[in-house]
Image (cartoon, helix red, strand yellow):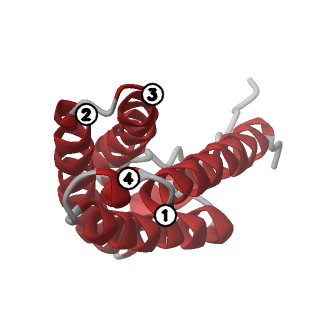
Amino acid sequence: MTTVHAEPVVMRSYPFSGIFVPFPLVCFTLALITDIAYWQTSHLMWQHFSSWLLFAGLVFGALALVAGLIDIFRPRTRGLRPSFLASLIYIVILCLAILNSLVHAADGWPAVVPNGLILSAVTFVLILITVTIAARYRALSFWRVA
C-alpha cells in the first residue's frame, strides 16, 4: 500500500488593506472627471464635487494605510500583499492628493484651472501605473509554481 504525504496547506488571509484601497483610487479618478467638467462649464458645483471626492479619497486612503500596517504584522497575508513599488507609489498618490486638496481649497477658477487639473491628471496617471504594477505582481505571484 502506498502512502502519499502532502505538504501542509497554509491558508492565506485576505489583506485588510485590499478592502479600502479601491475607494481612494475611484475617488481620485472621479475628481479628475469633475475637474474636467468644471474646466468646461465653470459651474461651481463641479469644484465642490472635486473637493468632496478628494476628501473622501483621503479618508479612505488613511484607512488603507492603517490597514496596510496591520497587514504587515499578519503573516498569513504575505502572499497577497502588494509589491513594495506599488505601495510606495500609493503613498505618493496620497501625498499628491493632499496637495491637490489644498489647491482645491481656494475659491473659484484658480482652485481648479490649471494647477488642480494638472495635479488630478498626474494622480490619475500614477493610479494607472500602480494598478498595472499591482496586477502584474499579483499575477506573477499567483501563477508562480514552487
Which residue lies at the image location 24% right of the left edge and 66% below the top edge? 62
Q: Amino acid at mark 3?
A: Gln
User: Alpha-carbon distance for marks 2 and 1?
Assistant: 21 Å
- Which element type, helix, strand or loop, lies under badge 4? helix
Q: Position of residue 46 (x, y in %)?
A: 25, 33
Query: Which sits in the foreground, 13 or 39?
Result: 39
User: Alpha-carbon distance for marks 3 and 1?
Assistant: 25 Å
The reply to whether callout 2 and callout 3 are in contact (CB within 8 Å) is: no
List the residue tagged with mark 4: 112
User: Alpha-carbon distance for marks 4 and 1?
Assistant: 18 Å
Q: Residues within 10 Å of mark 4 (few under 14, many from 20)?
A: many
Q: Earlier in the sequence, mark 2 or mark 4?
A: 2
Q: Earlier in the sequence, mark 3 or mark 1?
A: 3
**Residue 93 bears which disc, if any?**
1
List the residue tagged with mark 3: 40
Q: Residues within 10 Å of mark 1 (few under 14, many from 20)?
A: many
